[in-house]
Amino acid sequence: MKNNEQQQVQWRQKLHETIFEADTPVGKYFDIVLMILILLSVITVMLDSVNSLHQFRIYFIFIEWVITIVFTIEYILRLIAVVRPLAYARSFFGIIDLLAVLPTYISLFLPGTHYFLVIRSLRVLRIFRVLKLVKYLKEAQLLLRAMHASRRKIIVFLFAVFSLVLILGSLMYVIEGEENGFTSIPRSVYWAIVTLTTVGYGDMAPVSALGQAFASLIMVLGYSIIAVPTGIVTVELSRASETRVSTQACPVCSAEGHDFDAVYCKYCGARL
């Protein structure tokens, strides 16, 4: 009985090293083949949308289904390889891996949804771990920490901007009116968002002198507002502590981004 349990543990460890780790030759080759399949899948979906290539669609569909089946088996193996499969399923890459296979199956009931398979391109992010680009992993961790630390400030900023465009759009609706294209407050708010973000589609424009003067103020205000979130993230980046990042994945919860000298997972406490 103990021998069977030991064999299962060894088999799971071997599977984990192959699928999640890039330190071994087998694991590296596995990830390289995975990257090739991801790129092939994305290219196939893109070519399938070209009208002049519809005569080859049967081949595109065949390739798509073969790759989807391979990715489905791979996703199941990833769940088996970790001690806590739900932790992996809820992780960033776990969700991406699931979304990489769902559109093909959903397309059986909702035609056209298979084009969402381009989300598989996000799986290419694993290339930083496969090629051991630790410097890029470290910078990615710094950026993630800065974004996480500044999330509350950015949320408050977005609520402030939402309130501002609501007020500005309502004022422009009163100034210009329906006769100048501002037929409702929601449409005027849309114009305020386009103007404040300096996008300027040009589908709506004030005609009166007062409206043009008011629009000019909004345009100038837009430049100062755009700089706010950039400044928030920049401050948090300067505060983020630079640490060496390992490419090792936790065998229990599959989490990555540990410190280079870490012995235990900082998310679940399992030994690395």
Image: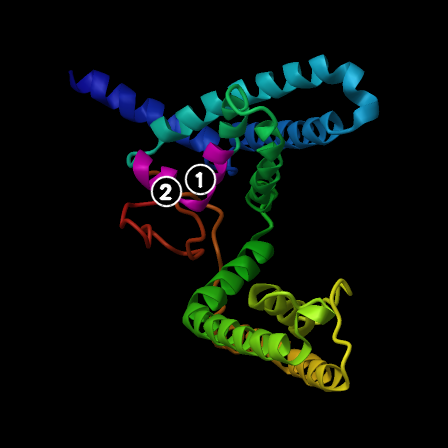
**Residue that numbered label 2 is attached to:** 90
**In the picture, which quadrant includes the C terminus?**
top left
Q: Residue at x 66, y 78 (%)?
A: 222
Quadrant housing residue 37: top right
Question: Does the residue at mark 1 contact the one at mark 2 (Cβ under 8 Å)?
Answer: yes
Position above or below: 246 against 208: above
Q: Per the image, is 162 magenta?
A: no
Q: Amino acid at mark 2?
A: Arg
Main SS type for the magenta part?
helix
Task: State the residue at coordinates (59%, 28%).
Answer: 114
Q: Position of residue 141 (x, y in %)?
A: 50, 59
Mark 1 lies on residue: 95
Mark 1 lies on a secondary structure that is: helix
Toward the right, the furthest residue is: 52
Task: Identify the residue at horizontal 58%, vertical 24% (top origin).
Answer: 111
- The quadrant where residue 48 appears: top right
Q: Give the extent of the magenta segment.
A: 85-99
Q: CA distance from mark 1 to mark 2?
A: 6 Å
